[in-house]
Image (tube, grey):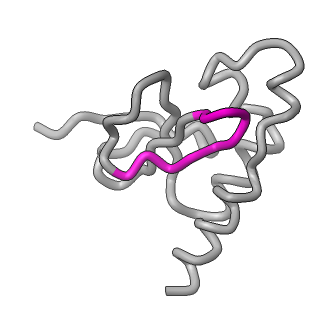
Amino acid sequence: MEPVRTCIGCRSRAPRSSLLRVVARESELVVDETATLPGRGAWLHPTVSCFQDAVRRRAFGRALRVTGSATGNLDTKPLENRLNWLMDN
């Protein structure tokens, strides 16, 4: 049986293989392709709508347990660009 994770955007449960793992690296959100990068990860459907919901709800800071002023300073642009590229291809 495949592990199940919860998308931080839509809050629905899905198989791990259908979600992207995202980690915070030096105030930037990075997609963890192999799910092996160290640190706390958050899971997200690879859709722009789930990404926008997560940003609107400020879910990245909470899920990744980023504290203080770093919560507001997480750079989401690289992740957004990546999701837009995935949707175009």
Specify the segment rendered in magenta.
Answer: 24-33
Q: Residue 54: x and y, percent?
A: 71, 42
Residue drawn at the location 51% of the way across and 60% of the way down: 46
Q: Residue 75: x and y, percent?
A: 77, 45
The one nearer the camera, 16 or 21, is 21
> Which corner quadrant of the image does residue 85 belong to?
bottom right
Q: Residue 3: x and y, percent?
A: 23, 34
Q: Measured along the vertical axis of the image, is residue 88 above or below residue 39?
A: below
The one nearer the camera, 54 or 77, is 77
Q: Measured along the vertical axis of the image, is residue 86 above or below residue 83?
A: below
Q: Measured along the vertical axis of the image, is residue 15 above or below residue 58?
A: below
Residue drawn at the location 64% of the way across and 43% of the way down: 29
Q: Tell me, yes or no, whether the highlighted magenta stretch contains residue 57.
A: no
Residue drawn at the location 64% of the way across and 17% of the way down: 65
Residue drawn at the location 52% of the way across and 33% of the way down: 42
Q: Residue 7: x and y, percent?
A: 52, 41
Q: Residue furthest bottom?
A: 89
Q: Residue furthest top?
A: 68
Q: Is residue 46 left or right of residue 51?
A: left
